[in-house]
Amino acid sequence: MAKIVAVLFADPVTGFPPEYARDTIPVIATYPNGQTLPTPKALDFTPGALLGSVSGELGLRKFLEDAGHTFVVTSDKDGIDSVFEKELVDADVVISQPFWPAYLTPERLAKAPNLKLAITAGIGSDHVDLATAITKGMTVAEVTFSNSIGVAEHTVMQVLALVRNYLPAYQTVLAGGWNIADNVARAYDLEGMDVGIFAAGRIGRAVIERLAPFGVKLHYNDRFRLPADVEEKYNLTFHEDIQSLVKNVDVLTVHAPLTAETAGLFNDELLSSMRRGSYIVNPARGAIADTMAIVRALESGQLAGYAGDVWAPQPAPADHPWRTMPHHGMTPHVSGASLPSQARYAAGTREILEAWFAGEKIRSEYIIVEGGGYAGTGAHSYAKK
Ligand code: NAD
């Protein structure tokens, strides 16, 4: 029998379960590329429920305990005295969501001799030291596509919020004001702008499709070029490298995984090569940007706005400089954790566990690391090209 440790975010301060705003969630037939939705043998939760917090337990307790496994759930994840660090020593499986990541550093992995499987309930497994996971022969799996469209929607929302100066205008309303000039002095239209997409995987591609009707000129860079018919359909300009992409756009959205190549990529040098007054929306990973370079670019006016929902580290400390920098539209890491996304990644987590305990293959689109190397989605998106 196995020990499974899930690190989940805390329950709502108003108590669990919350009062839901709606009674149902939409039924999605398949993902845009034809990939099927998660296919667990059964579900012990109602789709639309809050599953990602401690009391939600990703709907897994009955399934795991009926099979005789031990299931530990905690939100206490950081520091050597944390519940997670103590429970890790004899854990076989760790589950965590990128919104509240259970960092599996080389030091922690060294303390977990039984750990064979790390599941990301969501997408983006950089909180696991993948090089060490490879050396240990672990499997790292995530629930590919479960929240990609939600993140694309959040991206479009934040692009519009920055360019149109929405958040200051909303603050004016809350403050009882009617300061038209103060608000419109920084308001622009997205129409006609050059918009760059850095990495056109599942999320980047969905952002392209959603932004095309706004009458923008679309540019992108990825390690793999999109098919010619897709480039033609959206009138996409392909750039060989990030340097060329950022120079030629007014708005940049970021959708690459955090890897050795992308860490700290948005530094002073790259930012200074952009058009003055550019906007960046980064819902990929906070560490792709150099924290203080972003602050400096906003303060100098080189950037007109920065938004996204990913920070380094997470949770961001109360004094994180991105909380107070000018012209930002940051949210906590929420874009991939809507209730419909939670239903899909909880079901996908169960699908992965069912396959794992039955000794069956986990579908390759969920695999990042397996058999001593990158495999499946990991081989395409994470491995050095
Ligand atoms: P994906 O695997 O479909 O796409 C990733 C793309 O990045 C691939 O096309 C790959 O070729 C490209 N890429 C990798 N390294 C690159 C590089 N150095 N230069 C250019 N392109 C590069 O992944 P996805 O589902 O689109 O997700 C992308 C990332 O978004 C995830 O890795 C994760 O970090 C983040 N994410 C965030 C949230 C959120 O809630 N904010 C949710 C899901 C995913």
Image (spheres, grey):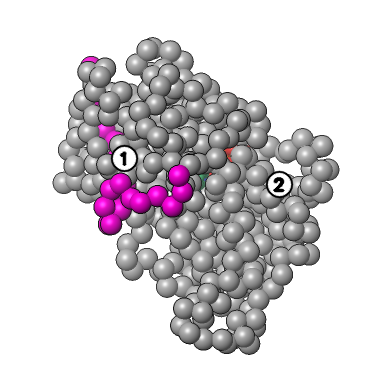
Q: Nearer the viewer, residue 259 or 186?
A: 186
Q: Nearer the viewer, residue 313 or 150?
A: 150
Residue interval drawn in magenta: 1-23
Q: Please give the name of the residue rendered at 46% of the width and 20% of the height, measured from the top-left corner.
A: 362
Tag 1: residue type? Gly
How far, Cα to Cα, is label 2 from label 1?
Answer: 33 Å
Picture coordinates of residue 165 (x, y %)?
60, 73
Picture coordinates of residue 178 (x, y %)?
56, 86
Query: Is residue 138 in view?
Result: no
Quadrant (top left, top right, bottom left, bottom right) of the N terminus: top left
Q: Please give the name of the residue rendered at 68% of the width and 37% of the height, measured from the top-left corner.
A: 224
Q: Quadrant of residue 347?
A: top left
Tag 2: residue type? Glu
Q: Earlier in the sequence, mark 2 or mark 1?
A: 1
Residue 292 is left or right of residue 27, and the answer is: left
* Tag in front: 2 or 1: 1
- The image's mark for residue 56 is 1
Picture coordinates of residue 337 (x, y %)?
45, 46
Specify the quarter for ligand 1: top right
Residue 245 is left or right of residue 348, and the answer is: right
Against 365, is 273 above or below?
Answer: below
The local secondary structure at tag 1 comes to loop
Magenta stretch contains residue 7 = yes
Q: Residue furthest front?
A: 23
Q: Are marks 2 and 1 in contact (CB under 8 Å)?
A: no
- The image's mark for residue 209 is 2
Q: Main secondary structure of the magenta part?
A: loop
- The image's mark for residue 356 is none
The local secondary structure at tag 2 comes to helix
Quadrant (top left, top right, bottom left, bottom right) of the C terminus: top right
